[in-house]
Amino acid sequence: MDSSITLGGSPGADLTKLSDREKQELQQFVVNESQKARIQQSIHSLTDICFRKCITAKMSSGKLDRTEEPCMQNCVDRFMDANMTVLRQLEQMRTQM
Amino acid sequence: MSDPKQAIMDQVRQQAALSNARALIEKVNEHCFERCVPKPGSSLSSAETTCYTHCMEKYMASWNTVSRQYLGHVQQGVQGQAAFGAF
């Protein structure tokens, strides 16, 4: 999936004419936008996974009913718990090598 | 004379928004086609179209719920967050 941020050469945008401060601001901006893009990507992946797990009934309405909403929330929380478990286990395996 | 820094920032934001919209549409189509059109006929029936609308709304509601929940964790600074980005 396309999550990279590319700085295209828009006409009239001469990067060499920017002051050092402006270059620094731009750099910080790109760092922030990259992080935002990564977060968006994670949200897309999580929604994909949790939708498949939690929305199993027929599409009778466009809203999340009172079982689907908590399921989605739990799904996110449990996924992050599981991720922590993986990292901890990996660390353990690494130190045992 | 346009501000080149602002132009670049706008372009980056625009690309990010486009990328986000593209990803969302792709996922909605993937899930909702699977759920609502099990056996493709010669046209989309009204039942299938209604199902698609519900499915799309449900998916966006799910996206919002996941987003809220996930950002809650991010703001709390959950450990290993950097590693999660590699997902």
Image (cartoon, helix red, strand yellow):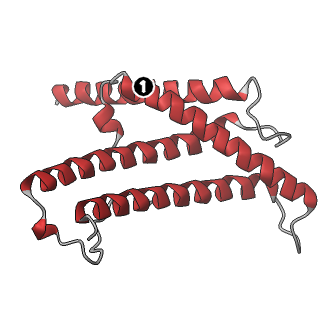
Residue at left offset 65%, top offset 54%: B28
Q: Quadrant of the C terminus of chain A?
A: top left
Residue furthest to the bottom in view is A11
**Position of residue A96 measured from the top left corner of the image (x, y, whole percent):** 18, 26
Which chain is home to disc 1?
Answer: B
Whether residue A52 is visible here, answered yes or no, is no
Q: Residue at x 68, y 27 (%)?
A: A69
Extreme residue in the right direction: B46
The residue where tag 1 is placed is B73
Q: Give the quadrant of residue B58.
A: top right
Residue at position x 35%, y 37% in the image? B84
Q: Quadrant of the N terminus of chain A?
A: bottom left
Residue A58, position in %: x, y? 83, 41
Residue B64 is situated, as x and y percent measured from the top left of the image, at 59, 37
Q: Is residue B32 left or right of residue B75?
A: right
In the image, A43 versus B5, the foreground residue is B5
Q: Up-down: is B42 above or below B74?
A: below
Front residue (pair A89, A49): A49
Amino acid type at mark 1: His
Judge by depth and name the residue closer to the eye, B30 or B2: B2
Q: Is residue A43 left or right of residue A71?
A: left
Taking depth in this image into account, of B5 and B65 the one nearest to the observer is B5
SS at mark 1 in the image: helix
- Residue B29 vertical position relative to residue A92 in the rendered view, above or below: below
